[in-house]
Every structure is written in structure tokens, then in C-alpha cells.
Image (cartoon, rainbow, N blue to C red):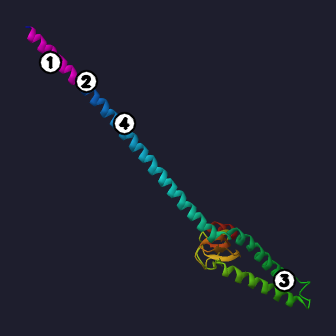
Amino acid sequence: MENENDNIIKDDQAIDGDIQPLENNKSEEIDEASLEDKLNEAQDKILRALAETENQRRRFERETKEAFEYGGFNLARETLSVLDNLQRAHLSIKNDENLKDSKDLNKFLNNIEIIEKDLITIFEKNNIKKINCLNEKFDPNNHQAMLEIEDEKVNPGTILQEIQPGYFYKDRLLRPSYVAIAKKKDIKNNEKEEK
């Protein structure tokens, strides 16, 4: 019997011995899994950082390109007021009754016209272009309606009058055209007027 008990003890020890290596294998598998997770997480962080760096580089290149292309945008917008004021001065002097009798008026007006033409030429050389809008369909992206005029001869929404010209700087809107647009006669107003 002793031999039999010895065998049982040996079998128990063998079983115990087998259990211990299984526990070690499980802990090694857990360690490997957590290491693999950590490695994947680190790899993901690196890829995200690289992607963000690439996005910043592209954004910087785009902003630099826009700065070169559209750097004069604000200067162009401010210079438009000089042209507007010059044109207003030209009209007011030309229509002034007291100055019409002056001998030098035509010389002065010719000089103002030369300055206007020079400014327009400078604008065109620098890709500042006037928006042609008369008799065109109203476009809220390029025009700003200042008033409506009843007119049955044209389609509603057609631009009848340009109050202040608009301009593009390359492909960007520098200033919208201030316009008067056509509208249909209001039937209710006609009925009230007839009564």
C-alpha cells in the first residue's frame, strides 16, 4: 500500500506541478496581451501625432499661399473709398452752378478724370475688377439691394440702377454692388391710388 500511496503523492505532486506551469502561462499571456495593447496604443498615438503634424504643415502652406495671394485685400478695400470720393467730387463739381461759369473748370475736371483712369488701371493690373451688374439678375452673393423700383418692362429681380459699384479682388468679393432692383407693381397699391 505504501507503493500505492507513494504513487498517489507523486501523482498529486505531478498534478500540482502541472497546475503551477499553467498559472505561469496565463500570467505570461496576460503580460503579452497587455504589452501588445500598450504597443498598439503607442502606435496609434504616434500615427495621430504624425497626422496632426501633417495637417498643421498643410494649413501653414495654405495660409502662406493665401497671404501672398490676398495680402493686399484690405489695402484694396480701403483704396476703393479714394476712387469713390474722387468720382463724387467730379460729379459735384461738374454739376455745381457757381463753378460752371469758371474758365478753368474743364481743365480741372480733365485732371480728375485722368486720376480716376489711373486708379482704375492700377486696380486692373492688381486683379481688382469692377462687377458689371446693370440689367443682370440680382445675385445676393455679389449685390446688395438698397431699394426696389416698380417696373413692368423687366423681370422682377433685374438690376435697374447701380448706386455704388462693387469689385472683386481676384476671385474674392471685395465689396458688393449697391443696387436698385425691379419689382412688379403692387396691385393693392394701384387699387388704393384709384380710390
The answer to whether marks 1 and 3 mark residues whose Cβ atoms lie closer than 8 Å is: no
The answer to whether marks 3 and 4 mark residues whose Cβ atoms lie closer than 8 Å is: no
Disc 1 designates what residue? 11
The answer to whether marks 4 and 2 mark residues whose Cβ atoms lie closer than 8 Å is: no
Residue 158 visible to an observer of this rendering: yes
Residue 176 point in image, percent of width and height? 66, 70
Residue 33 point in image, percent of width and height? 33, 37
Of labels 1 and 4, earlier in sequence is 1
- Left-right relation of 142 to 118: left
Disc 3 designates what residue? 95
Using the rendered view, name the quadrant where residue 56 is placed: bottom right
Residue 138 point in image, percent of width and height? 60, 72
Disc 4 designates what residue? 34
Q: Residue furthest top?
A: 1
On the rendered image, what quadrant is the C terminus found in? bottom right
Q: Residue at x 68, y 66 (%)?
A: 192
Disc 2 designates what residue? 20
Of labels 2 and 1, earlier in sequence is 1
The answer to whether marks 2 and 3 mark residues whose Cβ atoms lie closer than 8 Å is: no
**Magenta range:** 2-18
Between marks 1 and 4, how big is the CA–CA gap? 35 Å
Using the rendered view, name the quadrant where residue 37 is placed: top left
Identify the amino acid type marked 4: Ser
Using the rendered view, name the quadrant where residue 11 is placed: top left
Between marks 3 and 4, how big is the CA–CA gap? 88 Å
**Camera-side residue: 84 or 26?**
26
Label the magenta part by its dominant secondary structure: helix
The mark closer to the camera, 4 or 2, is 2
Q: Is residue 104 above or below residue 157?
A: below
Identify the amino acid type marked 3: Asn
Q: Residue at x 54, y 60 (%)?
A: 57
- Left-right relation of 12 to 142: left
